[in-house]
Amino acid sequence: MSVRLLPAVAVALLASASVSAQVKWDFPTPYADREVLTKNTVQFAEDVRRATNGQLIITMHTANSLIKNPEIKRAVQTGQVQIGEIFKPNMGPEDPVFELDAIPFFAPGYKEARVLLDVSREAISQRMLKQGLRVLYMCPWPSQAFYSKKPINSLADLKGTKMRTYNAQTARLAQLMGAIPTTVQATEIPQAFTSGIIDTMFTAAGTGVTTKAWDYTRFVYDTQAWVPKNIAFVNEKAFQALSEPVKKALLEQAAIAEKRGWEMSEAENVNGPKQLVQNGMTLAPITPQFATELKKIGDQMLDDWVKKAGPEGKKITDAYYSKLKGN
Ligand code: PCA
């Protein structure tokens, strides 16, 4: 072999090493491309590719396209896919620590949601790790608004109506409100309304825009009652199999994604309602009576939560109240 060829051989060897080092992951999310939290995650995937010089390629599968919402967590746990994102309170039946942010009026706005995340992050991360999952980031949905075909002044107006729900906690909420819970995924909201399966729903203004809520509802009520979070996580074994620099880059980009996701969500919390109004919907605060009734239900859900969550749950709520006072 001539001396002049050596550099070429070396280059070829290096190239094959970097090809074999390239890792490809699939990332399912239940939510449509237009949702702010999906946009944030798509950006995260791009940022990871750039930050790792293409050594980690994350392919997004949005809107329940690869794996359906209820199966995403399991798919990541079993290694069917390596990484995923879900609505965190969906895991409430496994452990109450996951659903505290979805209790009406417990942590009603962004400031409170932030404090709640600070005091519960450790407990959430530990539980996920015990299940072989590493938490990457947690970002809030905008405030959960209430949508209806007819004006709603109090719970009496909801008696016997069908309310869209998407997990155990929203089903419980519907029951306490005297409505009939009906499970509908976010991507199926328009069909469910137009075919009469549901009459009302709670969801962010942004999700109302994504699903063109003006086509099938007329009234949207700004509840300012809760801003629940999504959680993005990776299979711990898949994470540990990465090289050290790639691990580091992934975690750095996850921290950036969390910060950006909160900012995007707050912006959407202002924009979403405007777009609903521009498209002809009537936007109003919930009536004082509806607010009082919903608050009472929130209190009851919190009582139930405290009983279920035991001493460790109490530690979280105590830390939350004291940090909130200090802020
Ligand atoms: N949009 C999603 C989750 C919460 C939200 O605001 C949904 O309605 O399913």
Image (cartoon, grey):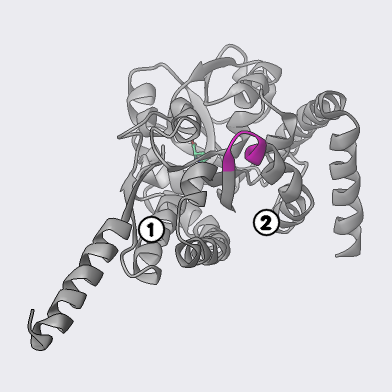
Q: Identify the element where label 1 is drawn.
A: helix
Q: From this view, report whether residue 246 is shown above or below residue 91.
A: below
Which quadrant holds the N terminus? bottom left
Residue 274 visible at all: yes
Region of the chain picked out in magenta, as a range:
128-133
* Residue 309 image-quadrant placement: top right
The residue located at (89%, 37%) in the rendering is 314
Q: How far across and down, in percent of the image, does residue 88 sit?
A: 59, 38
Q: Which residue is mark 2?
A: 110
| Cα–Cα gap, marks 1 and 2 | 25 Å
Ligand 1 within 8 A of label 1's CB? no
Please give the label number shown on residue 45: 1
Q: Nearer the viewer, residue 327 or 294?
A: 327
Q: Identify the element where label 2 is drawn.
A: helix
Q: Nearer the viewer, residue 314 or 107?
A: 314
Mark 2 closeness class: few <14, some 14–19, many ≥20 residues within 10 Å:
many
Drawn side of residue 232 relative to residue 22, left or right: right
Please give the label number shown on residue 2: none
The residue located at (62%, 34%) in the rendering is 89
Specify whether residue 200 is painted magenta.
no
Q: From this view, report whether residue 79 is shown above or below residue 177.
A: below
Q: Amino acid at mark 1?
A: Ala
* Residue 168 image-quadrant placement: top right
Q: Amino acid at mark 2?
A: Tyr
Drawn side of residue 209 relative to residue 172, left or right: left
The residue located at (69%, 37%) in the rendering is 127
Which quadrant holds the C terminus? bottom right
